[in-house]
Image (cartoon, helix red, strand yellow):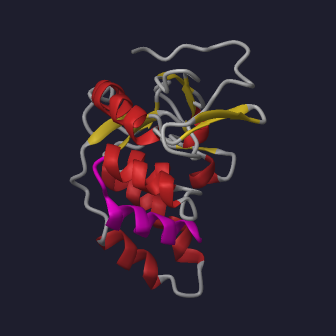
Amino acid sequence: MVPRQLAGIGSSPRITSSGVNNIRKEGDAFRILREAEAMEFYAQQYFAQLHGLRPPSPGWEGSCSGGTAYDHWLTNLTTCGPFNSVGAFYDFLVAPVRYCPQPDLADSYRLRLSDHHKIVFTHADISEENILVDETTGDITGILDWEMAGYWPSWWEYGKALYGAWNKEWWRTVVGQIMVEYKNEAELDMDIEMF
């Protein structure tokens, strides 16, 4: 399964929540509640292939283009990296905390991030809005928004899938069913993001 650009996708159905085994058109999106079933297929096929890709060199983290990375959660519309190790990335991640009224929090946060996470290729922006589905079967037909894809720590996909979803219990449930959970890292990252 290789990502490819699709034309005319503005009104394509996406995974959302509605009623059991129900697909109905609502505005420009089709709603399904069989998202967990559809996502299990996605997880089994897609994540295995995606996370099986390795960086250009051991320890390297950055964009799928091989250069600097774009991630609006990290850099507010600027680029960062690439990084030569997980530790260098984590140092960058906690750096903004050093400018807060309690800069010692940066060291506390940094100690809680293990330098031993495996680096895997991630989409880095998986959400119900970025998954296209077939309106009649619920099968996944495409994945959108690849601009943040790259090589990141193994927990990054899980943490990023939860961004903006803390009030969407149904999506958190789906993510918990299809991904290895890294709750500590995700919560820590959400704390750091406040800086």
Question: In the drawing, does residue 163 fall left or right of residue 104?
Answer: right
Span of residues in magenta: 179-195
In front here: 76 or 92?
A: 76
Residue 191 falls inside the magenta stretch = yes
Res. 153 in view: yes
Question: In the drawing, does residue 159 fall left or right of residue 6?
Answer: left
Residue 120 screen position, x and y as percent? 31, 36
Instruction: From this view, report whether residue 166 is shown above or below residue 161.
Output: below
Residue 193 screen position, x and y as percent? 55, 65
State which quadrant residue 181 falls in: bottom left
Residue lying farthest bottom?
A: 101
In front here: 105 or 34?
A: 34
In front here: 12 or 121?
A: 12
Residue lying farthest right?
A: 27
Q: Which residue occupies 70% across, 20% down?
A: 9
Quadrant of image for the N terminus: top left
Instruction: From this view, report whether residue 83 is shown above or below residue 87.
Output: above
Residue 47 screen position, x and y as percent? 33, 32
Q: Which residue occupies 27% across, 29% down?
A: 48
State which quadrant residue 104 falls in: bottom left
Quadrant of image for the C terminus: bottom right
Q: Which residue occupies 67% across, 24% down?
A: 12
By secondary structure, the bulk of the magenta-drawn segment is best described as helix
Question: In the drawing, does residue 74 fall left or right of residue 8?
Answer: left
Q: Count the numbered circles shown.
A: 0
Res. 70 in view: no
Residue 147 falls inside the magenta stretch = no
In front here: 16 or 119?
A: 16
Instruction: From this view, report whether residue 59 is shown above or below residue 169.
Output: above
Residue 124 screen position, x and y as percent? 48, 41
Q: Which residue occupies 35% across, 27% down?
A: 50
State which quadrant residue 101 falls in: bottom right
